[in-house]
Image (spheres, rainbow, N blue to C red):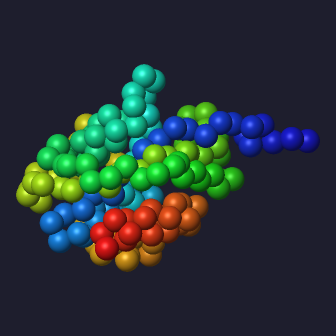
Amino acid sequence: MTNKKTNLPLRSGVGIVVLNKNNKVFVGKRIDNQKNFWQMPQGGVNKGEDYLTAALRELEEETSIKNAQLIKELDGLISYELPKNLLGIIWKGKYRGQEQKWFVMRFLGQDNEINIQTDNPEFCKWKWIDLENITDLVVDFKLHVYENVKKKVKEILS
């Protein structure tokens, strides 16, 4: 018997590494997960939308950040698969995971401009952390994504 859920497509998505003036990384604690998992802003690409437009939209939707400057679009796409217990639940059951284009951006504003109490909040808390620590707080099925992104951002910053 084949599992229909593994035939599902990957969702097209974006992720954003937001750096402050001290090169600390923005992370938010997901509202829908009671465990201590944090993530960088990310989300889906709408029909007809390019990756950068989607990244800027997602960043504003999740954090209210408008005052950001693109540092670099990371090469390639990075994908992850959902664990079995989330298949058929997340994204209305349409996708088995995500294939993401990542961007590194510099936050040019003040911390008081960041507001996670948005129309459809995804985060219950947020903080700035060292780049080195982004892999300590992420949910396990996205760990390889964050390791890959961390390596690329370190190269950019060195």
On screen, residue 82 versus residue 12, left or right, reads right
| Above or below: residue 83 compared with residue 99 | below
Q: Which residue is drawn at 45% across and 24% down?
A: 47
Nearer-the-camera pick, 102 or 119: 102
Q: Which residue is drawn at 53% across and 48% down?
A: 77
Please, which residue is most extreme toward the right here? 1
| Above or below: residue 154 compared with residue 69 | below
**Quadrant of residue 56 in the image?**
top left
Image coordinates of residue 95 in percent, x first then y, are 61, 38
Nearer-the-camera pick, 75 or 147: 75
Image coordinates of residue 18 in percent, x first then y, are 27, 57
On screen, residue 28 versus residue 13, left or right, reads left
Image coordinates of residue 20 in percent, x first then y, are 19, 63
Nearer-the-camera pick, 87 or 142: 142
| Above or below: residue 20 compared with residue 12 | below
Q: Residue at x 74, y 37 (%)?
A: 7
| Above or below: residue 111 compared with residue 50 | below
**Quadrant of residue 83 in the image?**
bottom right
Q: Residue at x 20, y 49 (%)?
A: 69
Res 92 seen here? yes
On screen, residue 131 versus residue 114, left or right, reads right
Image coordinates of residue 88 in percent, x first then y, are 64, 40
The quadrant in which the N terminus is found is top right
Please, which residue is most extreme toward the top here? 48
Figure label count: 0
On screen, residue 110 versus residue 19, left or right, reads left
Res 115 seen here? no
The quadrant in which the C terminus is found is bottom left
